[in-house]
Amino acid sequence: MHGDAAPTTRGACADITVNGAVLVADCAGVLYWPAERTLIVADLHLEKGSAFAGRGMLLPPYDTAETLARLSDPLRRYAPRLVVCLGDNFHDDGGAARLLPDDRAALGALQAGRDWIWIAGNHDPAPAAGIGGAFAGVVALGNLVFRHEPVTGPSDGEIAGHLHPSARVSRRGRSVVRPCFATDGRRLVMPAFGAYAGGLDIRHRAFAGLFGGDDFSVHLIGGRRIYGFPASRCL
């Protein structure tokens, strides 16, 4: 494993160095960059419930409220100056227009007093009206590059979402599957944050072009802490 990937775990958080930048992986499912006072979150998939309802697949219509409420905790704890949302912020291009007034107000409260960047995703490639913040395809900051979908092959400093990584490990005789951060110290793929977002096992072929074999680590999100494992421990 690349030397920068070795984590320092301290319960609810793990320090991970990516391309020289020291980042904090938080068990809330977000990443914080102290040097830049920047919080990163991936794949909110807001209004997924209403998108499914429009196709006749009824889900409880509370995913947006739950996702925003969960996001409020790390924003309060870290008080970032900048928030970067790594695409698939809404489940489709019409999601922003379907926001309920209370959810729109909650989003505005989260954005107040800080900069906010929405990165385009494959579910929401076009800028949305009336949701505040700025819109971008890719954002470079310091020695990191933020985008939605990781590129195939080497990409030093890349922080991406899209793949919703999860990992299965065996602990104390039982198998556990959890969302995770996946990194080799050169790039990092973030777990999905949205209440209705699923996960993709890191053994899926979609990860094969990102990391060299098992030359990376996973940082599983537990209820109250981060658990770090080499990829070789994943089933």
Image (tube, rainbow, N blue to C red):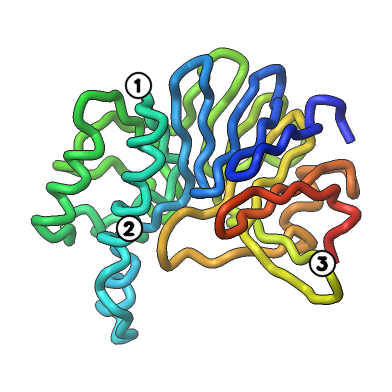
Provide the residue designation for mark 1.
Answer: 81
Quarter of the image for residue 210 reads top right
Q: What element does badge 3 sit on?
A: strand
Examine the image and state in which quarter residue 99 appears.
bottom left
| Alpha-carbon span between mark 3 and mark 2 | 33 Å
* Disc assigned to residue 171: 3
Precedes in sequence: disc 2 or disc 1: 2
Q: Amino acid at mark 1?
A: Arg
Residue 71, position as x, y percentages in the image = 36, 47
Instruction: State which tag comes first along the sequence, 3 or 2.
Output: 2
Q: What amino acid is at disc 3? A: Arg
Quadrant in which the N terminus is drawn: top right
Of residues 10 and 88, the one nearer the viewer is: 10
- The location of residue 90, given as percent across then percent down, is 34, 54
Residue drawn at (41%, 40%) of the image: 74
The residue where tag 2 is placed is 46
Structural distance between the alpha carbons of marks 2 and 1: 22 Å
Is the C terminus in the top left, top right, bottom left or bottom right quadrant? bottom right
Label count reads: 3
Q: Is residue 16 above or below residue 22?
A: below
Indicate left or right for 120 with 104 as reference.
right
